[in-house]
Image: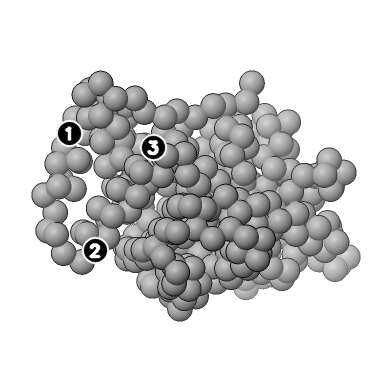
């Protein structure tokens, strides 16, 4: 690997910019419009699934249950991080788990405000994935995290905070860490652009990802008696990791009476169907498949929940809020 040529990040053509990210619905939601829209949808098929997901998230927040969101890399590239961070602040997210590509896109957005290079163009000359700054930042963060005894997600978030990354307000990892929420990264060796660079330390990557797996298993231990798990855009890695973490939790005696699992993606792939929607709820619970584009489904879900919060607050209720690190 010592002969691999890298290039400066500024020389790379990127397809996604932080200016393209969406803006979540505010404190007043849609002044009742989104809540009314949900109520007016047909009581059939996917519309019923959307209602059920909204209802279960509201119930989980009200009762202080675990709400785990698992995110694939495409989620960051579609500009929906601000909506998910808003849901953290509203109390609808208590933990996030991401794959390696998600963490890389998240870091690049936080540092440079750009991500998602032109793979086809850069593959031709072998420059795909060779941005030096991305590798150097992550490798330094990994070394510091190994020494600090934390996992990869927390290690990257701490590094973004130390670097005062200019766009860290839209970083999912930094947002979760700043709000004291578990943020875990689950890496398969050889799948991410960082593994192409000579500075990649397989021992450090494996150690940190293993720590995060155990943290995720600890999150799963709190699934009883009820919890909500949302898989958003991961077709293979996170469904596999989730099933193993949940197995550890059940082995240690966690037996939820109702588990609500949802898979939101453009296609309903085999592993999310089996490992998220079907197998985990075999002993009680509900599976919610919602098929569509992230850049539409996530803003819609956030707007409905924000609107319902505003209606509830206007009726004299209270909504949960996030807590940031000082």
Residue 129 can be seen, yes or no: no
Residue 261 can be seen, yes or no: yes
Q: Along the line of sight, which residue is nearer the eye, 62 or 26?
A: 62
| Nearer the camera: disc 3 or disc 1 | 3
- Number of numbered discs: 3
Give SS at disc 1. Answer: loop
Q: Residue 320 occupies which quadrant of the picture? A: top left
Whether tag 3 and tag 2 are in contact, CB under 8 A, the answer is no
Q: Position of residue 303 (x, y in %)?
A: 29, 40
Mark 3–mark 1 distance (CA, rounded to whole Å): 20 Å
Would you say 320 lies left or right of 115 here? left
Sequence order check: which comes first, mark 3 or mark 1? 1
Quarter containing the N terminus: bottom right
Q: Position of residue 223 (x, y in %)?
A: 53, 53
In the picture of the structure, the residue carrying the numbered disc 2 is 46
Would you say 28 lies left or right of 184 here? left
Residue found at the very far bottom of the displayed protein: 270
Q: Along the line of sight, which residue is nearer the eye, 77 or 5?
A: 77
Q: Residue at x 69, y 43 (%)?
A: 154
Q: Residue at x 47, y 39 (%)?
A: 64
């Amino acid at each position: 690997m010592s002969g691999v040529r890298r290039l400066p990040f500024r020389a790379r053509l990127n397809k996604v910019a932080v200016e393209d990210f969406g803006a979540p619905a505010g404190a007043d939601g849609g002044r009742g419009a989104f809540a009314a829209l949900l109520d007016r949808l047909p009581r059939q098929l996917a519309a019923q699934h959307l209602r059920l997901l909204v209802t279960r998230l509201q119930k989980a927040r009200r009762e202080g249950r675990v709400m785990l969101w698992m995110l694939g890399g495409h989620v960051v590239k579609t500009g929906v991080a601000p909506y998910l961070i808003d849901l953290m602040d509203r109390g609808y997210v208590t933990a996030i788990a991401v794959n390696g590509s998600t963490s890389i896109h998240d870091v690049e957005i936080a540092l440079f405000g750009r991500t998602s290079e032109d793979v086809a163009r850069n593959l031709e000359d072998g420059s795909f994935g060779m941005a030096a700054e991305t590798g150097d930042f992550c490798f330094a963060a990994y070394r510091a995290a190994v020494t600090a005894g934390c996992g990869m997600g927390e290690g990257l978030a701490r590094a973004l905070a130390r670097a005062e990354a200019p766009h860290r307000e839209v970083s999912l990892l930094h947002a979760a860490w700043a709000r004291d929420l578990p943020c875990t990264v689950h890496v398969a060796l050889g799948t991410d652009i960082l593994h192409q660079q000579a500075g990649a330390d397989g021992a450090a990557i494996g150690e940190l990802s293993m720590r995060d797996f155990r943290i995720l298993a600890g999150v799963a231990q709190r699934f009883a008696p009820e919890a909500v798990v949302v898989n958003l855009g991961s077709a293979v890695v996170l469904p596999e990791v989730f099933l193993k973490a949940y197995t550890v939790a059940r082995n240690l005696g966690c037996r939820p009476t109702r588990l609500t699992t949802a898979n939101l993606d453009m296609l309903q792939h085999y592993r999310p169907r089996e490992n998220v929607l079907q197998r985990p709820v075999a002993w009680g619970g509900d599976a919610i498949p919602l098929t569509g584009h992230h850049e539409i489904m996530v803003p819609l879900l956030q707007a409905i929940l924000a609107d319902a919060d505003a209606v509830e607050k206007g009726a004299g209720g209270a909504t949960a809020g996030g807590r940031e690190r000082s």
